[in-house]
Image (tube, rainbow, N blue to C red):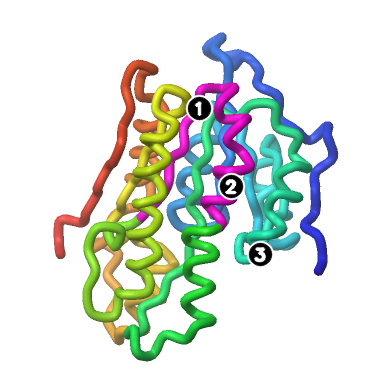
Amino acid sequence: MKQPTQPTPNEHPASAADPTTGTERKVVLLTGATRGIGKSIAEDLSGDHDLILAASSEESAEKLRSTYPAAQVFVANLADVESLESALSGLALDRLDALVPCAGVTGHDPVRETTPEQWQRLFRINLFSIAELVRCLLPALHRAQGIVIAINSGAGHFSGKGFGPYAASKFALRALTDSLREEERGRIRVSSIHPGKVDSDMQREIQALRGNEYNAAQFIRPETIARAVRFALETSEESMTEEITIRPVQQ
């Protein structure tokens, strides 16, 4: 199996004082930054945070490096959970202020039509990879008294026809973050953000599969979710934003 590309040690973004504010820039590791919500989060944070961006391929990595030249970019196959420890060890992180797992995949087939392979892919990317990211990065998060901000979904609270497999992975992610929050209370903070339908490539794919005409005005702007991430990240140290649910006005 091909090993993920590892960055050289001098690529690590050390925390440094922001010249405009004099305060230390926080280090944030983000997955899913190439499109949709993750892209908006990266755009929002890139000006005043040191970003570590996970890319799914060398091609995606090159695009991220071009877009965010100050960021550290590494390749990690979230579907290959067993390879993540090696990819993360190459970062040589001493401390990490925030982990924001945003990458995810969708699945909207009825339960009776969902194959074992589809179930495995949903859970490996939407749940198992996040659990492994947390396990590997927890020491660095402890040293920074950092925060995990998991991008979940409205499907982490509600399911329905055609949502069973996807919602199952998101319900499980909510259980993971709820448990982690209590296990690590006082050492790190854990936030869970549950967007409803967001204007994104993924949403376009979903609506096309359903034969619906796409109207971006009906969906949440990804920039709104990015602002929620910033709010959770900047919550003062004596408090914790445990969960944020954002839904479109039109249901």
Which residue matches tag 1? 146
Whether 52 is drawn above or below 76: the answer is above
Q: Of callouts 2 and 1, which one flags the residue occurring earlier in the amino acid sequence? A: 2
Q: Position of residue 57 (x, y in %)?
A: 70, 62
Is residue 130 highlighted in magenta? yes
87 horizontally vs 170: left or right: right
Measure the C-alpha gap from mark 3 to mark 1.
26 Å
Q: Main secondary structure of the magenta part?
A: helix
160 horizontally vs 49: left or right: left
Under circle 1, the secondary element is loop
Which residue matches tag 2? 133
| Quadrant hosting residue 186 | top left
Q: Of callouts 3 and 1, which one flags the residue occurring earlier in the amino acid sequence? A: 3
Residue span colored magenta = 129-152
Looking at the image, which residue is at 56% across and 35% down? 28
Q: Position of residue 119 (x, y in %)?
A: 47, 76
Whether 62 is drawn above or below 216: the answer is above
Under circle 2, the secondary element is helix
> Which residue occupies the foreground of this view, 232 or 137?
137
| Tag 2: amino acid | Leu
Assess disc 3: are there few (<14), some (14-19) or many (≥20) residues with their C-alpha within 10 Å of its C-alpha.
some
Which residue matches tag 3? 80
